[in-house]
Structure formats: C-alpha cells, structure tokens
Amino acid sequence: MFGIFIFCFIVSISGLAGGAFTLVEPTIYDWVVSDGRAALESEAVKDAENRASQGFTLVREQDSDIGRFWMTFDWDGGDIFTAPNVKTMCEVEQVFLNAKDYGRFCRLNATTGRCLEPTLTVTYAFYGTVADSSCPLLPEAQVSNRARELYDGLTISNETRAYSAFFMEKSTEERTPVFTSRTRSRIDLGAPLEGFTSIYDEEADQQKDYTEFYEDVSKDYFDAFNMESVWLHSAYRDRQQRNGITCKWYSRPLGDIESTELATGDLLLCIFSLAFVYLWMLYQMRSFFLASFCMLQIIISLPVSIVVYRSVFQVSYFQFIHILVIFLILGIGADDVFVMNDGWRFSADAVEVKELEKAGADRDTILETRLEVAFTSTIGAIFTTSFTTIVSFLATSISPIMPISTFGLLAATAILLNFLLVITLIPAVILTNHYWFVEKQCCIYSYIRVSDDEDKDDDNDQPKYLEEGKVDEEKSDEGTSEDFQKEPMKDKAYVAAAKNGKMKETKDRPDEKDEMKLRNSVSSIEGKIPHRLGSTGGSNLGSLQAMISVGEEKGHAEEGEDAASPAETAVSGLDWFIARAYQPAMTVKRGKYYPVAIAAVAFFLTYAIISLAFSTQLTPPDDSAQFLPKDHMLVKVPDELQEEYIPGEFSNFAEVQYPFGLDGFDRGDFDRYKPGENRGKVKFLSDFDFFPEESQRLFTFACQAAQDRTCGYDACNFGRFMLPRPNAIKCFLPSFQKWFISRNPGLTTFNCSRSQFYSELQLYRNDTSTVSEDGLTTSDKLALIGFVDNELKYVRIDFYTTIRTDEATIDVADARNEADDLADMINNHKNTIGATAMGDTYSASQTWVGVEVEFGILEGFYSGLAICFPVAFVVLIFATGNLLIAVYAIITIVFIVVSVLATIVWDGGTLGIAEAIAGVIVIGFSVDYCLHLGHSFVDAYHGFGIKSRGERFNHAAIGMGATVIAGAITTFGASLPLLGAQFQFFPTMGGLMAATVAFSITFSLLYFMGTLLIGGPVGGAFELKWFAVKCGCGPCLKKCGCLKTEEPENIRLTKPTMAQQPSKPK
C-alpha cells in the first residue's frame, strides 16, 4: 500500500520538477480549428504577408488589433461635453498615455519616428494634442464650441461624420438639441514590435510583449481609481467613477490577464469540494483512516494523470479548463471507493467466509478470503461504469476544438488512473484499516437502528415496512406479468436474519437446509448487485434487511456468535427514504394498475418531449467564448462599443481578403498542442504572373464585382455585400496605374515591358512619401502587393463587408456563402478571359475562422453523442443481459440529455464550450444510475427467482435505490462550489454537472423504474438467452451449459388471464 503511495508521490514530484503542472501561455490560436478551411486560407494570407514584409519592416507603423485600448465615459447629467468633464476624461486617458514603456509600444509616425497623436481620444478632440498631461481646465465656451463642431460634423460630409460619429452614442441625432451623454476614446498601439518583421511574425511572442505592457497599465488604473479585488469578486465588477463620470476601459490583453487571475483564485473553491467529499466519505465509512487514505488516493490520481497526459501522451497543452477535472474526479473517485468498501463490508457474510469460520481457519486466511470476495464482487461494476464514463470523455477528445479535445483526454486519463488505483490501492487500505483499527475498535462509527417498538405492527412481529410491502399470499402461476411470490418480503427478512447469524427459534424459522439456501441467496445478492455508485451505511439490500431483520437483539450478537462490526451494519437516512417513501409510493396499486408509477412515467415522458422540442433550438453562441462574468467591465465595454454608439468603425464589420497567387498552406510538422508555434508555411503558385493584360483586367473586375455585389442574407446590411463607405475597399491597381502613367508618359501597364512593369510596381509598393488618393498607406501596399525576394508572388484585394461582427453565428455562416459565390464568379470570369496565370482566388477572413470555431464545437458535440449513445446501449445490453431493459434505459438517457440541453435554452444559453462538454459526459453519468437499477432488476430473477415486475421493482428499489442516490449526492455536492466561481467556464460547467446529476437521478428512479414496474420483462423474457431459445438455439445453449433450465422456453408471451393476475395488495 505505502509503496503505491510513495510511487505516486515520486511521479507527482517528478512532474512538478519537470513543469508538468505549469500552465501554458494562452495564444490567439488555442481555439482555432487548425485543419479547417477558414483557418488554412486565413493563415495562408497572413504568412504570405509576413514573408512579403521581410526586408522592408515598418516598426510600429501599423495598427495593432491586439494592443488596441478603449475607454468609455458615461454621464447622467445631460451633455457629457462640459469643461469639467473634458478635464476628467483627459486625466483618465493620461493614465494610459503615461504608462511605463508606452513609448516602446505606441504607434510611430513613419516620417518623424515619434509616437503618433491618438486622434480618436477626447483629449485630442478638445485639446488638440495629448502632450499636456496636466489636463488644464478649458474655458466652458471653448468646450461648448468644439462640441458643437463635432455635432455639426455628423451632417457636413462623410469624412466629418466618420470622425464625429466615433464620439457619439446611437440616440444622439434623435435628441433636440443634439447631444450625447456618453463618449469613447481609442488609443492604437503600433505593430510590428521591434525585433519582428510583420504583425504576423511570431504572433505569440508579440502578444506576450503586449500582455506584459498591459500588466503595468492594469496596476496604474487600479491605483488611479483605488480599486481592490477580493477573493471571488473582481474590482472590475464594481462601478468605477471619477467626478460623477462612469469610466470603463478595455483591451484584449487585459481580458487575458484578468481571466488568468480569476481562474487562479477560483481554484481555491476545490477546497470546498474536497471538504464536502471528505466529510461525506467519513460519514459513509465511519473511519478517519479509511476516509483519509481513500481521499488521498483520489487526490493523488490527478497529478499522476497530468504527468501521464503530458509526458506519456506528449500533450503539452494545459490550461485552466483542464483544472475542472479535479471536480469530476472527486465525485467519480468517491463513488468507486464506496463500491469497494461496500464489497468489503458485506463480504463478512459470504458463504466462503462463513465456512472458513466454522472450520476454525486462522484470521489471515479469513481476511484474505473476504478481500477476494469483495474484489471479485465489485470489480465488474467498477470497470463497467468507469468504462462508460471514460468513453464519454474520449468522445469529447475527437472534437476539432483542441482545448475541448485535450480536456476530454485528460479527464479520461484521470478516470482510468483512478480506476487502477482503486482496484490496486484501496483493497490494501481497507485491509490495513481492519488490522489497525477495526479489530482494535478504534474507528468512529455510528449505528442507526429501527426501534423495535416503533417499527412493529400492532398485530404481529413483522416490521411495519414489511407489512406495507406485503402482497396477497395467493400464489399466481409462473410466468404471469405480475407473478408475486408468497410473502416475499417476509422471506427476505429471513434471508437477512440468516445472513447476520441471528435466527431465533420460532415456529416460522426455516430448517437448516432452508437456512443454507437463504445464505447462498445472500451470497448471490452480494456477488451480483453492482455497487458502482455505492454508499455505505446500508445503501444496499443487505444493509437494509439487516436494519429490519426479524428478531434482532439490539444490534449485538449473542455471546459466542460471530457478529459484524457496527460499521458493517450501519444504515443511512437514504435507506429510510427508499423504504418509507419511494418504494411504498411507487407500488401503490389500484386494481391491476400502479397509478403513481403511471403518473410519474406520463409526467416525465411529457417533460422529455417538451425538452426535446426546445433542445433542437440550441445554437452556437453569437460571440467568441467569454470567460469573465457578465457584469465585468471587460465584458461590458465590447458590448457597449457594438450596441451603444453610432456605427462607423470599420472594426465593427467583417473584413475579407481575396488573394491571387496562393496555392494553399502546408502545416508541415505542426504540433496542434502547441498552437502558437510553427503553424506552417504558405505555398505560392509557381506560374503566377500579374503582368498580362488579362491578369490586370481580372483584378479590376474583382474590385468592381465586390463593390457591386448585393447580399440578401440576414447578416448583410444595406442590401449589399461590401460596406458602402469611402475607403472600405483596398484595391491598389487603379492607383498604381495612375501612378505608373504619371511616371511613364505614353505608356500604360498594358503596353510596357514585363521588367518595367514589375520594377515600377515594386517602387510604388515601397514608396513611403505619399498616401494614394484611395487612402492606401505604405503598410497597406506592403500587405496587398506581395514581393518576396524581389519577385511578385501574390496580389490581394481587401474590403469590409456589411456583416457586423456581432451577428448571430448561423447568419454569418449563411453570409459566408455570398463571399464564396463572389470568389466563384471571379474564378469563372478568369476562365472566360483566359487569365489563368492568376490562379483561383478565395475569401479569407478572421470572421470565417470564428464561425468555424463555433461550428467545430457543434461538430464535436454531435460526434460525441453519435459515439456515446451506441456504446452506452451496447454496455447496457451486456451489463443487464436484457434487451427490453436496455431499450428502456437508453430512452431514459436520451430524455436526460435533452432535458439538460432544454434547460440551457430556457436559461438563455447557447451551445458553448461548457455546454458541449457537459452534453456528452451527461451520458456517462446517467448510464451509471440506469445500469445499476436495471442490473438489480435482472438480478431479482436470476439471484432470487423473482419473476413478477412488482417484486423485481421492490428488489431493485430496496437494494439499489439508496445507493444511486448516495452516488448522486457525491457528484452533486462536488459540483456546487463551482457555482461561486468568477471564471465563467467553472460555474457554467458546475451548473450543468449539478443539473445532469439531478435529471439523471430523478429520471432513473421515477421514469426508468416506473417503466420497469409497468411494462418491464417478466421472468427471463427479452434476455439474450430468451431470444436465442426463440430462434431455435436452445439445445445448443444447453449442450454448452449456457442454458441450465427449461424455464426460458416455457415463458408465455400471451397476456395473462384475469385469473392469473395477482390480487390487490393488502
């Protein structure tokens, strides 16, 4: 035992020393579907631009989308543009402008090499410069006049409107007089950073540099606003005000920094999960030693799993999403431990053990036999349920979204390692506990008994519960649909009494032969009932019968008898719930019907049908995955920028690129688990030629086609595909042709020589002295005209579409068809005019990449379901051996899944990351409950010869009902602390886990068990052997020993007559 613990500790320490538990730096490519068409096409364009920029680097002369900083200001007192307010907003902006190392990250003027003035700031708009960090109070008249100029600029021209509208909220023009009560500012940082050749060169490293800069910015703003975060509450969730103005700020790196800090703090919540599970184990096991070492086994399985995951499987990606595995393994691991402990407790009454005791065997031999009995009676159940859960997690590992895929792989690894440790370590822990504590009576146990006076009927010695469950003693014919045995509950009481060695000399006591038969039946119970979700303290048939056994002597064995310890006979309140509430209520009978069971089945069937209808409405999220709370500043600002201000920012619309000359993208030896490294190289067309007239005319046609293209999809606005605004398209050829003619009188780009054409094109591209009349800057031309090693490799058209970036994913996916149709039209025109040297073009866009991510989540989800459901059905068939029960169970599982998904829809959620994971693993959880209840229902026939549905229901409910509830409590309790987390993936996943457990346990106990009570199999009907006999294979099965009786052949398929129906229960 200690050797295994020491080995696990060594592995864990080695992993710690080797950095196995170190989180990797997040990158912009983590969630990208790397082998998706959109990703490949977009990255081909990026890499082509990166290679074209080499040798002509404009350090920090381009805008950086990653480094862009936003500020918003809200004022409740009318027009926000007053002198005091302008001064306040200037002071807030100066916090950023005076940040440490701002001079190393600001966007540079290409001519002077100095930081550009951020013109889209309130400071610049009113002061004319941002150089004066003192922000003096301006005269009110000056501020009022400048504000009027901005308001008038909304109607003067398109150029003035674009600038003025930036500072105005949407309702500005609806007011009389015109004014805005909120405004915003934007400060662009430069790209590429020093040491990099382009904005796409080593993006992960550049992102890291921006993040380090923003760490200082974050501290500066915390100091400026006296902000202080506490555990489970970020200061960003509070309203930050200065002089009555509500101030907010945002940048992407700030969101990454804050997500990391919140997730780190939320990890402390696992302490509460650990505490709950430990206390629950302590209550169930009644032993500090046993509970502590079992808890240690569960905990140690996680670091060992991480080491295996990263070192053996060579998966380097490890982020906060993977930490959630600890909450899963707590519930699952505790269940496995309970199962093994249950097997040990009830092994004391195994036939083999009793025979050894009678033979006077030594203690060690008896204990070894007990351990063998416990192991063999539980290993199958633990393996089967662990297998289904592993499969459900492996199903998520096929997701095209790498973080989800790796999460599933780590979770499956953890469950597998936990299973191996349970079957190797826990038996040794149990035996050590017995040697060190149980035999010395050092454990802390509780022993709950039924009061003899309270629980007995007034008229006889039978406990009330047994009397309530008793049916008419009239024996019905074998094989009827309601074949109740004569006083079955009383017989079971005798079984319990025989099991505990406490049979008294009464007139009803069985003879020695019958008693041995009953003992063998007890052994059959313990060997056949799976305790996967086991709970100690009597959450099984044996313990419940021990509680209500006939003629107990106050929980103490008579002198000289071999009595079990209190720990082995203790019961829990769950047994009382099953015995006094659930089972009596479900088996209430009116005539030949069970009204409560029928009502339960009807209710849950209706609920499931409604849930199925709503679950089909589940769609991908409209935005990218958001891990911060909804009331968080860094969540509010992006939403406000999209919804509260006059549309005008190009960044609010999807940009697309149409390249010519590219021939795909080669991933090479790319490692998907290192998404920010070595992503591949672009492939260029070997015969690309832009000089022929046909090639130039095709390019001109493409530019005009983009501007003329209409769009009828919901995501498109204004009825057009390209945004109808000045400078919305970057088409360099008309500008170049004019530039060429001005430099070469009498020549055009059509009649010049090839060498002259390319020479002039390269000069035009590299010219930094002027900005073309169509607004193209040098950085634009470097991106659009791709010279690599002085050879033109590609040309490109960029333009902004009318598709807003906040449109629904489904609508954007439809609008992407318009982009593809435009590419097809251009390619067809290419073939028509013979411009084959240009190659085919396509539509590349980061927006399409985002759509691909959302649909990748959907694909992984539905693929996971397609794997899990068939596997679960096969497992149910072989675990229960009965096709009808397996069908009932898989239908129940489907209903559980759709109920969870419908809950997401009703809560206003979408099929995001957590929902996609939970939707698949719910199958693994729900299979466990149905499997154990169904197996117990089957065992009633094979282990006890009970054929009727009613009595088989009683057997399953009493023997397994409390067990599955106890297991559900473990997982449910472990998930609840997640609801208090700020990192939104955790509470979302925690809520889904809790909902999954709640639906699973209620559907299993009420719907699944109700269907078995109403229409379950009778005797051996619908078993695999039964089908084999019906197919004429009975003689063969008898020869091989697989069919030991003639009974399955004699089962009647016709409906029993009224005479054969059981009498109404007393």
Image: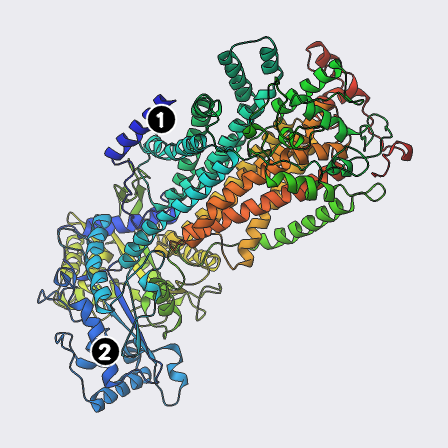
Q: How far from the left and from the top, in percent, is residue 902? A: 57, 53
Callout 1: SS: helix
From the viewer's perspective, is 487 left or right of 516?
right
Instruction: Relative to 144, say whether 16 is above or below.
Output: above
Q: How far from the left and from the top, in percent, is residue 444? A: 48, 33
Residue farthest to the right, as pictured: 1059
Q: Write down the residue under mark 1.
A: 5
Q: Badge 2: few (under 14), some or many (20 or more) residues near its Cα, within 10 Å?
A: many
Quick check: can you spot residue 859? no
Q: Nearer the viewer, mark 2 or mark 1?
A: 1
Q: Write down the residue under mark 2.
A: 88
From the viewer's perspective, is 1012 left or right of 23?
right
Amino acid beneath label 1? Phe
Callout 2: SS: helix
Residue at coordinates 30% horizontally, 54% vertically from top-left? 256
Q: Badge 1: few (under 14), some or many (20 or more) residues near its Cα, within 10 Å?
A: some
Q: How far from the left and from the top, in percent, is residue 180? A: 34, 82
Figure disc tally: 2
Residue at coordinates 66% horizontally, 22% vertically from top-left? 499
Residue farthest to the bottom, as pictured: 141
In the foreground, 30 or 79? 79
Q: Quadrant of residue 77?
A: bottom left
Quick check: can you spot residue 500? yes
Residue at coordinates 35% horizontally, 52% vertically from top-left? 841
